[in-house]
């Protein structure tokens, strides 16, 4: 069952509308509605992560030196914790020293944040960024 689309009116000052239209165009959106829907989803995701009571998901992107002694074992140990579920891990050799990994994680926000902080703080991890998302039921 899909939700019915409802139209509503929003009043904006002209300069804000002009900024909105610029963003719609430069970011490649088909319409103002698509852009506004993405903004609403982003805000709802932030709120869901802050509340921390539901299941969310995230993608942790890291770059690390694979020559760092013991780092691979530590990465695996953190990912095998029971606090959140690792759904997928993609490993790419960027160059002789650097590996890039994306780790898709599902669970409570606090548990995902904890894993991201533990991995990001490991010696040899050069970059770590958690992209947060949530689930939208239509």
Image (tube, rainbow, N blue to C red):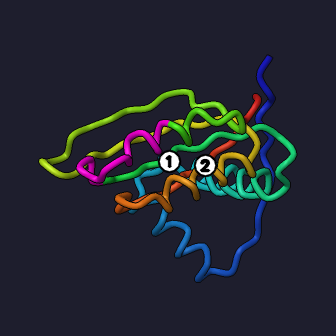
User: What residue is drawn where x is 72% and y is 57%?
Assistant: 46
The residue lying furthest to the front in this view is: 69
Q: How crowded is the residue under tag 1: few (<14 C-alpha within 10 Å), some, or many (20+)?
A: many
**Residue at (46% x, 58% y) in the render:** 122
Front residue of 103 and 49: 103
Nearest the viewer among 132 and 30 is 132
| Cα separation between marks 1 and 2 | 9 Å
Q: Secondary structure at mark 1?
A: strand
**Image position, residue 12 (x, y; %):** 71, 74
Residue placed at 49% from the left, 58% from the top? 120
Name the residue tied to disc 1. 60
* Disc 1 and disc 2 in contact, CB within 8 angstroms: yes
Q: Secondary structure at mark 2?
A: helix
Q: Is residue 33 left or right of residue 12?
A: left
Q: Residues within 10 Å of mark 2 (few under 14, many from 20)?
A: many
Q: Which quadrant is the N terminus positioned in?
A: top right
User: Residue 34, image x and y in percent?
Assistant: 58, 47
Whether 103 is drawn above or below 11: the answer is above
Q: Which mark is residue 91?
A: none
Q: Identify the image quadrant of residue 89.
A: top left
Was residue 61 drawn as part of the magenta stretch in this picture?
no
| Residue 72 forms part of the magenta stretch | yes
Residue numbers of the magenta segment: 65-76
Residue 107 position, x and y percent, is 72, 37
Residue shown at 56%/68% (left/top)?
20
Q: Residue furthest top?
A: 1
First reached walking from the N terminus: tag 1 or tag 2: 1
Query: Which sits in the foreground, 39 or 25?
Result: 39
Q: Is residue 70 left or right of residue 45?
A: left
Q: Which residue is mark 2?
A: 115
């Amino acid at each position: 069952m899909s939700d019915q689309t409802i139209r509503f009116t929003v009043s904006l000052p002209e300069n804000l509308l002009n900024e909105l239209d610029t963003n719609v165009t430069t970011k490649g959106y088909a319409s103002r509605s698509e852009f506004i829907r993405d903004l609403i989803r982003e805000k709802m995701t932030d709120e869901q992560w802050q509340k921390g009571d539901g299941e969310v998901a995230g993608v942790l992107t890291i770059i690390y030196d694979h020559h760092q002694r013991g780092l691979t074992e530590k990465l695996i140990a953190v990912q095998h914790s029971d606090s959140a579920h690792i759904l997928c891990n993609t490993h790419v050799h960027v160059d002789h020293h650097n590996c890039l990994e994306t780790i898709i994680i599902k669970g409570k926000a606090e548990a995902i944040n904890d894993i991201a902080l533990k991995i990001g703080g490991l010696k040899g991890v050069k970059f770590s960024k958690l992209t947060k998302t949530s689930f939208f039921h239509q």
